[in-house]
Image: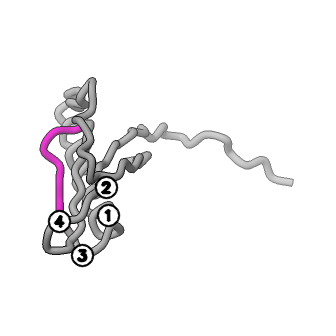
Amino acid sequence: MTDLPTTSKKDQPAFGCVVYVSRTESGRTRGRVANLEGVETEGATERDVLSTIVRDVRARISEHMQREEEVPWLDAPAEKQPDEVKRFLPLHL
């Protein structure tokens, strides 16, 4: 039997992304990242919104890492509004 590796050769950073999802008046889905300022989007479905947010957050994190800067995570996530549902997205780059 071949031993499977338990770790990768290059450690992949993992991040926790808090997203608030709601419906707009027009019936579209809106999502905003609660612990990283300035990332929000709108789409036809929650899946569309979360996919876009994952792409945008990964790009933003990568930019900061390339410049050897810390990712500007918010110490206290933005406040959730009554009409929003909280989602937690674990991200790997």
x, y percentage for residue 87?
A: 39, 50
Left or right: 35, with 93 as reference point: left
Q: Amino acid at mark 4?
A: Thr
Left or right: 1, with 33 as reference point: right
Q: Amino acid at mark 1?
A: Ser
Question: Nearer the N terminus, badge 2 or badge 3?
Answer: 3
Tell me the distance, in whole angstroms, between the alpha carbons under discs 2 and 3.
16 Å
Q: Is residue 39 magenta?
A: yes
Q: Amino acid at mark 2?
A: Val
In this view, the residue in front, 60 or 75, is 75
Q: Which residue is mark 4?
A: 24
* Circles 1, 3 touching at the beta carbon (< 8 Å): no
Question: Nearer the N terminus, badge 1 or badge 3?
Answer: 3
Magenta residues, start to end: 36-42
Tell me the distance, in whole angstroms, between the alpha carbons under discs 3 and 4.
10 Å
Q: Nearer the viewer, mark 1 or mark 3?
A: 3
x, y percentage for residue 31?
A: 24, 56
Look at 32% across and 60% down and name the residue there.
Answer: 50
Q: Nearer the viewer, mark 2 or mark 3?
A: 3
Of helix, strand and loop, which one carries label 4? loop
x, y percentage for residue 63?
A: 19, 42
Look at 44% across and 46% down and name the residue there.
Answer: 90
Q: Which residue is mark 1?
A: 51
* Circles 2, 1 touching at the beta carbon (< 8 Å): yes
Callout 3 environment at 10 Å: few (<14), some (14 to 19), or many (20+)? few
Residue 44's label in the rendered image is 3
Q: Which residue is mark 2?
A: 54
Tell me the distance, in whole angstroms, between the alpha carbons under discs 1 and 3.
12 Å
